[in-house]
Image (cartoon, grey):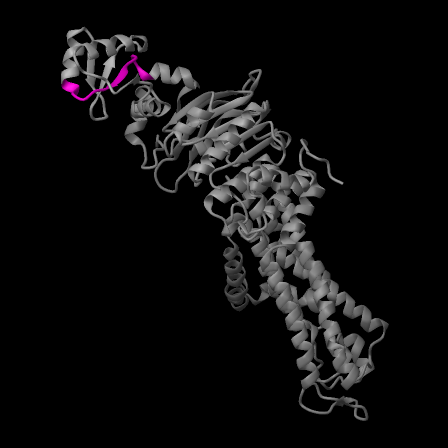
Amino acid sequence: MTAPLGPGPPRLVDLVRAEVLRALTRRAVRVLLAIALIGTVAFSIITFLVADEVDEVEGRRAGPGIPARVVDLWPDPAVTEPNVGQADEDVDAILVPAMIFLFLGALIGGATVAGAEWESRSIETTLLREPRRARVVLTKLAVSGALAAVIGVGLLLAWSAAWLPTPVVKGDTAGVDAPWLRSWFAALVRAGMLAGGCAVVAGAIATIARRTVAAFVTVFAVISIGEPIVRGLRPSWQEWMILENLGNVMLAGAENIMERSTLGSFATLTLYLAAVVAVAVVSTTRRDIV
Amino acid sequence: MIRGVAGAVIETEGLRKEYRRWRGGPIVAVDDISLSVPEGGVFGFLGPNGSGKTTTIRVLLGLAGATSGAARLLGGAVPGDLADRLPRVGALVESPALFGGFSARRNLAIQATIAGISSARVDEVLDRVGLADRADDRVKEYSLGMKQRAAIAGALMTDPELLILDEPANGLDPAGIREIRDLIISLGAEGRTVFVSSHQLAEVQQMCDRVAILNRGRCIHTGPVRDLTANIGGAAAILVTVPDPAAARSVLENAGFAATDATTRGQLRVHCPHDRAADVNRILAGAGQWASELRPDETTLEDAFLRLVSEPADSDADADAETAGPAGVAAP
């Protein structure tokens, strides 16, 4: 229950509620969610149609199409190989493409939630209610990050559920045990956190530049131009690259991307995120709102 | 730091705002403005384009930082005490800053949520500005006047003691302008202070008790509207409409009155106190010059404003006038 009229300074909880309301009612966010859900349904239908039935005698795929095993959703080698017994065969990772799309969606969502407020100047209206700019920026970024993380885990759960009919009807559930379930769920949580981080970074860049598109351009420039150049010129700096650390956290060291531990990569990414957020806060507090 | 004046809701002292440029010197948008707006009533904030009105308002509301000088809002320092003071202030700055993809109701609901007030208040303020019927349409589909109303509704959300409205009638049709004028007058009559910047001087004259006039970033006049029109207007005169102005002028001059041609064709301006209108009428009638109209030549706020902004206030203003940019802001 809220007071009829509030003469005091705005409360943080009210600011958070307002930002959640603002983010979830943005058309761009809803369109992204709709695309994700439509894509998930399409994935479910297509994989069901094209998946090969598992040859139960041989225990391996019967044709050239994708195999129909539950564990192919998230084939943590350490967990799945002993159960499935297919060390000679590449394991599929049906969750990984979904994670990559999730990160892209989080980038777009985070950038548009923050950037559109600057472009429409509605940030002024917010700051006329709550003039503590650092609080506004941090709340906005935290809310978009938290929403991206929660929505991300939800979408990956939906993606996992959409995969289930294929192995249940055409394949097998071998290897689905407590360790595998733990590994799968940990992957969902890590992906959710990374999606949250993507949304925060994109939102922070959009806040610094006060333009949505600046976030897309910056991320593209760093990932597609900056990092490949550095990777080529200074291979020893690879462990500081965003993509390598992102992959290391996403796959939890399963693919031997780098020597750095998953936790080390997570800390590196957190450091980058904190730096971008700090610049966004300082930029917003120091510059005029025009 | 300035010492608060009792009863003043807005105070500035030596307020200056410069905008730095990559090349050339800084642009001075506001130059040494000292202002005191008393509590209650409607205060007009006037000035030509680029005179620094909006910049002053932005500084007062914490959206821009002052280069030097000090400001107080409702007795609290700007920007230090704004978090405590802004909940008691409603503001509309420049054009309406609403998110176009949301409806007015959604925009206001978000504002209400931040302010921690009941969403029922959204319907009240939408109704007050006459936007209840279109409240669920997206703001991007609104006319400028409707956006303006929605923004004013947002300013009224917290039932503020002080309203700061920057060009509130911008984009409104004549009926809308009248509604907003009536709304502002009623808000002032309720005991609130309404600080309104406007170009529409006839409206300001009807709404405001006091005005401050800015030109080239400086405050060149502040005081009651009545004093402004009386002092700036010069000597009293009577406007007379007659069929033959040349003959009438001769008659009046022979009777000892000074008369000149007025701007309207067929009209004479007779320079004398207003209470001598009956004498003027009698003399003209005696000479067969029947006046079809005879009325006091009252100086409007527009006349006074134009006279003030067209003449430099002092030698510094002269210097500024010579270096002013195209938007009217002065470069040092």
Please tell me whether residue B239 belongs to the stretch shown in magenta: yes
Q: Which residues are magenta?
A: B233-246
Residue A67 visible in rendering: yes
Foreground residue among A37 and B120: B120
Which residue corresponds to the image point at 42% horizontal and 33% vertical from the top-left?
A: B18
Please tell me whether residue A93 belongs to the stretch shown in magenta: no
Which residue corresponds to the image point at 67% horizontal and 72% vertical from the top-left?
A: A40
Relative to B245, does residue A169 appear above or below in the rendering? Answer: below
| Image location (x, y in percent) of residue B224 | 44, 17
Quadrant housing the C terminus of chain B: top left
Residue B60 visible in rendering: no
Foreground residue among A120 and B253: B253
* Horizontal side, residue B286 vs residue B325: left or right: left
| Image location (x, y in percent) of residue A197 | 65, 57
Choose top left, top right, bottom left or bottom right for residue A109. Answer: bottom right
Relative to A196, does residue B68 appear above or below in the rendering? Answer: above
Quadrant housing the N terminus of chain B: top right
| Image location (x, y in percent) of residue B308 | 33, 22
Q: Residue furthest bottom?
A: A57
Foreground residue among A39 and B211: B211
